[in-house]
Amino acid sequence: MTVTCLKRRSAAVQLGLCFLAAISAGAQVDVLTQHNDNTRTGVNLHETVLTPENVTKARFGMLFKRVVDDQLYTQPLIVTGVEVGGGTHDVVYVTTVNNSVYAFDANDAAAEGPIWHVNFGTPANMHSTNFGCLDINGQMGIIGTPVIDKVRGVLYVVALTRAGAVTGPHAGFTQRLHALDLATGADLPESPVAIQAPDFNALMQNQRPALMLANDMVYVGYASHCDKDPYHGFLMAYDAKTLAQVAVFNSSPTGSEASFWQSGQGPAADADGNVYAVTGNGSWDGIQNFSESFLKFTPQLKLLDWFTPTNHFALDKADNDLNSSGATLIPGTHLVVGGGKEGVLYTLDTRKLGHLGDEQAIQHFKATASHLHSLVYWESAKSGNLLYVWGQRDRAKVYKLIGDKLSETPVTMRDVPNEGHPGAMLSLSANGNKDGILWAAIHATGDSWHESRPGVLHAYDADDIRRELWSSLELPARDDCGEYSKMAPPTIANGKVYLASFGFENTGTGQFCVYGLLPVPGAEKLPAPTGGRAELKDGNVKLTWDAAPGAKVYRVQRTSSLEPRPKMLAMGLTTTKYVEPAPERGESLSYKIFAVGTDGVSGGSALVTVASQKAELVED
């Protein structure tokens, strides 16, 4: 198999290869946006390692965790084949409310330090003005999940920072859209740009929804903090290459509020590039102001169509936002589904949303007892087309899609409801239409609305969710990831599960945990890599070797005649190549290569030796 790799745009060393041999069989999966793709189904259909048979307490558990500088409200993102530091890595990208972005090796437990870490400066926090509640109970720098353009090698993220003197109640803050080099974390030449629009208040507007990349544009949505005015629902589009602002839509230009909250879910986009988003409480007149509504836009954010339920004024009065789940597009159909705090699920025809009135919907019904925060859709060979929900203070449920309607009685449900706010954040992994696993991240006890609570990650058989496969609290000493990260779905890719966490304190701590198949006791040790070769070329040492059976990644260790103590140069390499600048002191270099697999680390390869020449001093 071959996989497209990313060239490090600003690296001193270029491997100059567009395609590299992958170690393991099967396609490598990238997760470049929240809930996997722009339909927001939350499904990875290319998971060939994890199955309902091997995700068990004995065979599956935490492999490693990485501590970061504050809470993670965002879903971890995965990019495979990134060229950085002289080799090729799979990389996991995470952000924190302290305005930090981190890149870590996604596979190797020994690669503890970040590949890079950038910070954009002092964030705002819940005491920057009188917000009146603790929906976010600490810093609030980066809240929305970034989006990645793998082809260009760019990560887009929005950060809220202090800027300049504070001269008014909301002055002294700015929000900026950054475009970062995937391999270095450096801002690209056109980055950053300040987020601006008429009536946009950088402090009061919460960049809660995930960013979306579609139509060669980056879409940025906005909600509020605690419904604290003044705010509007903004959706903006920026040119992905230049970061020039292309369009701004305000959902309440002559009123107020009507935010794009969506519990952190990003806008959706269909195959024609049309954009879908859902609003919450606020002003409504059906002309310019569209609270409590499903909205359909052109790529340039011109409003094409809309749907507003009959009881929208009652929803607004009771703070029952329609948009707590966001919009999920059902692949292969013209259906969009979503629901809100009332627990009512709507199924709509994207070709004719219908405007005002429940009779315009294909169907609507009470799907869960309270807030509906996360939807997952999967087409199972065994059980049919399934929609998964786990609402607030309710049980996990599965509804079956038949034609253009959902069964209004669950085909399966769990026995025990969860406590408090919110419901579970869901993701699903499967090998096409089989071996489905429903992953649910939720607080283990209590209510997470205004404080951090202990979290738990569940794995269920997606064909029968009554069958729990594994839980992170079965063996908490091994698998507990700490406090629940509110509304961050787990990420599943290439045999691993990446889970965001608030760490172990109410505020100020954060981490993410990586789960996968555990080593098998007594398994045969991996063979050491063979066929090592090294050459001096173009001022670099180029090291190659043959693939080792069972290897997932490789490590490279070096000794030299001037530095005899072994030094680990690289970990987590996903290809059989490594490059470093040749030393200029004149010395003999010796390299050992180690293979790393599910069941452990091999012994070192035979030494691969090369001699460098001492650089000559040239006098003027």
Image (cartoon, grey):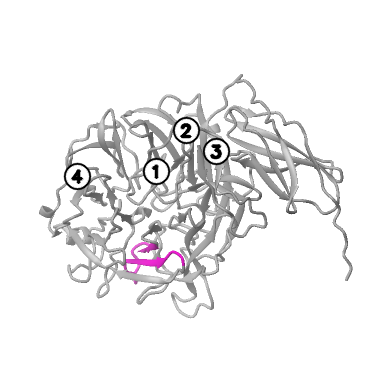
What residue would you read off at disc 4?
Answer: 366
Q: Nearer the viewer, residue 69 or 229?
A: 69
**Separation of disc 4 and disc 3 at Cα?**
47 Å
Q: Is residue 530 above or below residue 563?
A: above
Tell me if 294 is positioned left or right of 76 in this view: left
Instruction: Give the number of the mark in front: 3 or 1.
Output: 3
Question: Residue at position x 51%, y 77% from top?
Answer: 166
Residue at disc 3, secondary structure: loop
Residue 596 in the figure: left or right of residue 192? right
Q: Considering only vertical position in the picture, is 40 above or below 159?
A: above
Q: Earlier in the sequence, mark 4 or mark 2?
A: 4
| Image location of residue 607, percent across then percent down | 77, 34
Residue at the (40%, 69%) spot, across then down: 204
> In this figure, which residue is indicated by the disc labeled 1?
446
Q: Magenta segment range?
A: 217-241
Question: Seen from this angle, which residue lies furthest bottom?
Answer: 167
Residue 543 location in percent, x, y? 70, 42
Q: Is residue 233 magenta?
A: yes
| Spatial CA span between label 3 and label 1 | 45 Å
Q: CA distance from mark 4 to mark 2?
A: 31 Å
Read off the residue under disc 2.
473
Residue 555, position as x, y percentages in the image: 67, 38
Residue annotated with mark 3: 22
Q: Secondary structure at mark 1?
A: loop
Q: Disc 2 residue type?
A: Leu
Crowding at dot 3, Cα within 10 Å, few <14 / some 14-19 / many 20+, comes out as many
